[in-house]
Image (tube, rainbow, N blue to C red):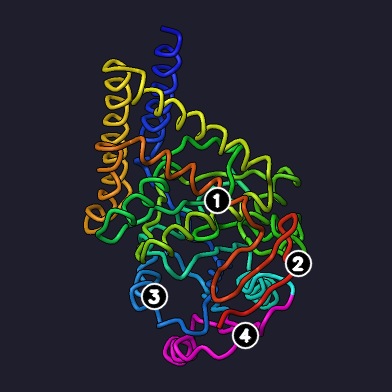
């Protein structure tokens, strides 16, 4: 009976966590559009022009200047500046030799800031942002409620079991309750005040690092900055690829964590390991009552997550995101086991393959890097 009680408590906590996230998604999604806003977008030189992303950025009701940061020659970025030069600026960073290429480009963009740039917004090139993205990120900053505001990735898996499984694992993270005091920013949709950037010496915080968001988040914690999640900004991000690339994606996310903060990795892995072990017990020894408890909680989480998806995504994005919900309904144990697998794989090496480069890390810093191919 003690095991059944522990199992029921764990499942209840996971269900309450998702329901609590749903309850805290704001309905009054107020925005701010102050002058002095700059949006920084790091691009690979083979960027295809991001027609959908640029169209979505143009729908933002907030006025801003867009900085495109590239390594060298990016024909699509050059063409965009030629067409839209009144609000787009191009920065070429060159090739890094001791830090992540994305970080290298972001640091070059910081050098291009003007004296009146007061609000800094960072986005990734693979997102499909809603029209409220910039205004919602800026709202808590302008109102003086936070120094750093962040959304979070919500994967839209391509058809296929593996991509939807990776999406299910990521959805566990996306719908975790987020206390402002325990928030880690996500570089795909993140904003901070110029004052906060100066307070943590943002350029120095990024120097030598591979992960931009981990570097900013850890520096913000040390400086006791106020970080706030914007819970309705679960930002759609398409996910596709074969099994190796999808598994590699999951491992890379956790290797970023493990190489920056082994304590954070250990805490997350310990929680998932407990869930994995108890699911194994429920399937083999727990009997019908244990299985019923597990599946009732899983279906409850699925319903709550479905409500979250309908609330935060555009209608045409919802069906793709819902592919991940089937795993929790049919085989929730597979989701936690897959989650644990990528967490364990993350500490088998200090090498991260990302954006056409191999990086070797120590304490979050790049010790060596080699270009692929």
Q: What residue would you read off at disc 3?
A: 54
Nearer to the camera, 138 or 70: 70
Asked which secondary structure carries label 2, the reply is strand
Give the answer, above or below, for where 296 lies relative to 61. above
Q: Residues within 10 Å of mark 3 (few under 14, many from 20)?
A: some
User: Which numbered disc covers residue 89?
Assistant: none
Whether residue 130 is visible, yes or no, is: yes
Labels 3 and 4: the sequence-earlier one: 3
- Residue located beneath label 2 in the image: 367
Q: Nearer the viewer, residue 367 or 278?
A: 278
Q: Which residue is at 62% across, 50% downward?
A: 347
Residue depicted at x 34% and y 26%: 283
Q: For the residues labelled 1 and 4, say whether their Cβ atoms are less than 8 Å apart.
A: no
Identify which residue, 229 or 328, lies in the foreground: 328
Residue labelled with disc 1: 345
- Distance Cα–Cα, label 2 vs label 3: 35 Å
Mark 1 vs mark 2, CA separation in Å = 20 Å
- Disc 1 element: helix
Q: Is residue 197 above or below residue 68?
A: above
x, y percentage for residue 22? 36, 35
Discs 2/3, front:
2
Q: Is residue 86 left or right of residue 141?
A: left
User: Given contact means CB atoms under 8 Å apart, are the residues at marks 3 and 4 in contact?
Assistant: no
Judge depth for marks 4 and 2 and give the one in front.
Answer: 2
């Amino acid at each position: 009976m003690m095991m059944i009680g522990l199992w029921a408590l764990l499942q209840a906590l996971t269900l309450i966590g998702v329901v609590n996230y749903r309850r805290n998604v704001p309905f009054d999604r107020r925005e701010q559009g102050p002058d002095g806003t700059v949006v920084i977008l790091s691009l690979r030189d083979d960027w295809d022009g991001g027609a959908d992303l640029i169209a979505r950025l143009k729908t933002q009701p907030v006025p801003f200047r867009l900085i495109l940061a590239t390594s060298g020659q990016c024909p699509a970025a050059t063409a965009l500046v030629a067409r839209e030069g009144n609000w787009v600026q191009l920065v070429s960073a060159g090739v890094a030799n001791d830090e992540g290429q994305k970080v290298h480009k972001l640091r070059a963009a910081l050098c291009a800031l003007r004296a009146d740039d007061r609000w800094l917004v960072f986005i990734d090139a693979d997102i499909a942002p809603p029209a409220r993205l910039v205004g919602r990120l800026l709202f808590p900053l302008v109102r003086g409620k936070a120094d750093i505001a962040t959304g979070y990735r919500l994967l839209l898996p391509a058809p296929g079991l593996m991509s939807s499984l990776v999406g299910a694992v990521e959805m566990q993270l996306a719908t975790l309750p987020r206390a402002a005091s325990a928030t880690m920013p996500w570089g795909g949709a993140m904003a901070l005040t110029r004052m906060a950037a100066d307070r943590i010496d943002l350029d120095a915080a990024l120097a030598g690092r591979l992960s931009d968001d981990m570097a900013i988040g850890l520096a913000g914690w040390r400086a006791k900055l106020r970080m706030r999640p914007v819970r309705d900004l679960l930002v759609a991000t398409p996910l596709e690829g074969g099994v190796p690339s999808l598994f590699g994606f999951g491992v890379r996310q956790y290797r970023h964590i493990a190489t920056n903060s082994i304590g954070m990795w250990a805490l997350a892995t310990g929680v998932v390991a407990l869930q994995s072990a108890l699911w194994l017990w429920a399937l083999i020894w727990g009997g019908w009552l244990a299985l019923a408890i597990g599946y009732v909680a899983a279906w409850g989480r699925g319903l709550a997550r479905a409500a979250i998806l309908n609330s935060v995504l555009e209608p045409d994005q919802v069906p793709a995101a819902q592919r991940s919900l089937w795993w929790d309904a049919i085989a929730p144990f597979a989701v936690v086991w897959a989650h644990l697998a990528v967490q364990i794989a993350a500490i088998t090496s200090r090498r991260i393959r990302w954006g056409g480069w191999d990086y070797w890390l120590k304490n979050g810093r790049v010790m060596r890097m080699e270009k692929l191919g």
